[in-house]
Amino acid sequence: MEKGVFSATASIICLVLLFVRTSLGDISYTVAEEVKRQHVIGNLAKDLGLDPKKMSARKARLDAEDNSRRCCEINPDTGNLIVVETIDREDLCGSKVICTLTYELLLENPLELHRISLRIQDINDNPPKFLNDLISLEITEAAVKGTRFPLEEAHDADIGQNTVQGYSLEKNDYFILSVRENADGGKYGELVLDKELDREQNHEVNLILTATDGGMPPKTGTALIHVTVLDANDNVPVFTQDVYKVGLQENAAVGTVVTAVNATDADEGANGEITYEFSRISDKAAKLFLIDKTTGQIKLRGELDYEEETYYELRVQAKDSSGLASSAKIIIEVVDVNDNAPKIVIKSLNDPLPESVDRGTEVGIINVQDKDSGSNGQVRCSVKHTVPFKLNPSIKNYYSLITTAELDREQVKDYNITITATDAGNPPLSSSKTIHLKISDVNDNPPVFEEHSYSAFVMENNKPGASICSVSAKDPDWKQNGTVFYTLMSSEVNGIPVSSFLSINRELGVIHAVKSFDHEQLRGFKVQVLARDNGSPPLSSNVTLSVFVMDENDNSPQILYPIPEGKSFMTEMIPKNAFLGSLVSKVIAVDADSGHNAWLSYQIIKSTDPGLFTIGLHSGEIRTLRDISVSDAVKQNLVISVKDDGRPSLTSTCTVHLLISDDLSEVPEINNVFSEDRNSNVTPYLVIALVSVSAFFLIFIIVLLAMRTCLRKKPRLSFDGTLAIPSCSFPRNYADVEGTGTIHSAYNYDTYLTTGSHTSDFKFVGSYEAFSL
Ligand SMILES: *[C@@H]1O[C@H](CO)[C@@H](O)[C@H](O)[C@H]1NC(C)=O
Ligand SMILES: *[C@@H]1O[C@H](CO)[C@@H](O)[C@H](O)[C@H]1NC(C)=O
Ligand SMILES: *[C@@H]1O[C@H](CO)[C@@H](O)[C@H](O)[C@H]1NC(C)=O
Ligand SMILES: *[C@@H]1O[C@H](CO)[C@@H](O)[C@H](O)[C@H]1NC(C)=O
């Protein structure tokens, strides 16, 4: 402003000098530019001492010296120099500091020439002006504080004080203005960075720059500074999350997008172009995951397995083109899917299992594994109820297989135990395993005979060595435990070892007779057959074999009375007055055989007088058929046959001699006959002796019974009638038959001495025990 005041003062001084003659003939004026037309600069007439009235007569005129521009003219009437055209100093002189127009005043008559110089004074009529209204600047954000950016100078057509004197800058955050002067004195501004730029905050700054001149009043000119903030790669890429955490099902298909990382770089262009890559990844994870370099998508490239790895931690790096990088963590948690069926492992198995084990015995140990976790890995294990086994849970995932019943190999020799394991997943998976368990044998079954007892019926007179029967025992045990051997248990039959009667085939159980049996000697016997298995220890059982020796008709009837001819001679006497039906005599015969073979029948096959006697068919009693008459012959002979009922039957014959007489002495021939026979004389004595011996014997027995006070049965030894049978006449072996004693009463055979008569003269029934007395 001081400069402005000073210039105003100077211009006043110039106006004072306006009227000062500079030189004779020359005159100088000063005029400000832009004065109004008709403005009187000065009076030339007066200033030159000329007569104003003569001015026009002398044709006063003004000639421009160098240029044709004629801003002023002379008024010939007044001699005033007046402005005829607006004077623009800037137009006339440009930037020249001194702007002077020179004119010549020409007068005629006489010719007079005066130089008139018109100095044009500047006024502040032009504002400062920038070359461009818009100043574009590009400043990198990396520019440091204090960096200067020279701005173009503003121009002002005015000169001196009226030219640009200063600049001002709109208030802003980033820049301040520094005004400087260049070598030619021109002033220009410089933007000074006061605060660092951040393209990411403000990518452009607009400022108004004002240039001010020194006029009074000052004029201003403005320009817009457009600062474009250039990017510097000053930003690292930034991930949207520090940690990306994802859950991924283990059965996710290959190609599944696991997650997408996203990093942004505030920088622009190449500086903001991000590529992604794994910066830290395990080899295992590298096989499973891949990342898209540009999109940041992480995809699954392999198959996951929760059971192998439940958790992956990766690092992803985002890098811009110039290499600034940052990283983020990716946590991939594998989510378990029930994709593993339980696995059944048999840890131990007691195979084969002896059948003798108790109920509740541990047979094996089962382990169940399920690789899945949580409920997917919780396994229940069971055995079908059809087998006598169950699973007892023991320590974690271990089960013991135990028996729930007693086992019997002979019923079930192996079991298929199906174990089923099911997990608790949804849907549940299950698996099963079949254990083939064999039951091994224990010798727990004795051989068992097929029948309770065996009977063998052997015809007497058999061939020695012939098989008579076979026994068989079964043992359901296995191999040697079930192999049966047969033996005869040692015992005696009538004091003779049984081995001399029978032998047995050790393996087959076929029993052979060792010798020929005789029914009359041995009716039968019993023997124990032992079946023994080959186990250790062996088991055995025994059975009774009853051997019955069957009768064959091999003995002909034996006539006891009358004593056969040749040995003795006996004659029966018949009283002469005997009536019809009188018992005359009796034939006594025995047969060593049994049953029908010993059932005897009697027949008269030849007689002296066929109509006189008859014989009882089975009693053997000879009776008269009619009364004896005097005419009948004294000597009567009867030939009698005794026949048993065997097939074929055997027959014996005897002759009965009868004498019809009241007195033995009447028949001398007979007497002779009697005297001839020694035995006939002793017969009465024999009878007396027999009776007395028998009596003595009876007394002896009674005494013995009394002594023993025993209730044993009296032997029924009876005598009937007058007939007496000598005991010595019985066949010896006949008594022996009864004496074998081993056959119980059920098997007793009545011995027929004589049969068919109610009044049996002699019937011998008794037990061996009775005779043992
Ligand atoms: C990344 O994040 C930015 C900002 O949150 C978002 O504008 C852009 O769409 C995202 N890019 C992708 C690929 O998701
Ligand atoms: C057990 O299974 C086998 C083979 O599958 C079969 O041959 C056998 O008969 C089965 N045994 C039982 C007792 O079911
Ligand atoms: C027979 O039984 C015994 C136990 O009594 C046993 O040890 C043996 O193994 C069995 N023999 C066979 C061939 O099974
Ligand atoms: C024969 O069997 C019976 C029962 O069956 C038994 O009491 C006896 O002891 C057995 N004898 C022998 C020698 O085994």
Image: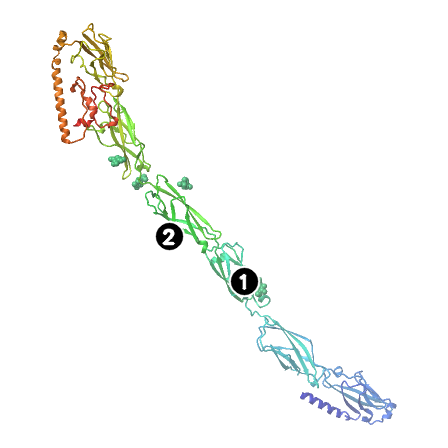
Query: Which element is circle 2 on?
Result: loop
Indicate the position of residue 56 as horizontal and vertical percent values. 87, 90
Q: Quadrant of the N terminus?
A: bottom right
- Residue that numbered label 1 is attached to: 261
What crowding class fits label 1: few (fewer than 14 Cα within 10 Å), some (14-19), or many (20 or more)?
Answer: many
Q: Is mark 2 within 8 Å of ligand 2?
A: no
- The front one of 555 and 558 is 558
Q: In this image, 434 relative to 473: left or right?
A: right
The answer to which image quadrant residue 574 occupies is top left
- Residue that numbered label 2 is attached to: 394
Indicate the position of residue 141 as horizontal and vertical percent values. 59, 72
- The front one of 179 and 756 is 756
Name the residue: 15% across, 29% down.
705
In terms of sequence position, does the residue under pointer 2 or pointer 1 come before the other? Answer: 1
The answer to which image quadrant residue 104 occupies is bottom right
Q: Is residue 283 visible?
A: yes
Query: Which element is circle 1 on?
Result: loop
- The front one of 700 and 304 is 700
The answer to which image quadrant residue 487 occupies is top left
Indicate the position of residue 312 as horizontal and vertical percent values. 48, 59
What crowding class fits label 2: few (fewer than 14 Cα within 10 Å), some (14-19), or many (20 or more)?
Answer: few
Amino acid type of disc 2? Ser
- In the displayed image of the protein, which residue is found farthest to the top? 631
How is the model colour-coded?
rainbow
- The front one of 244 and 577 is 577
Using the image, determine if residue 218 lies above or below residue 493.
below
Amino acid type of disc 1? Val
Comparing labels 2 and 1, the label whose residue is closer to the camera: 2
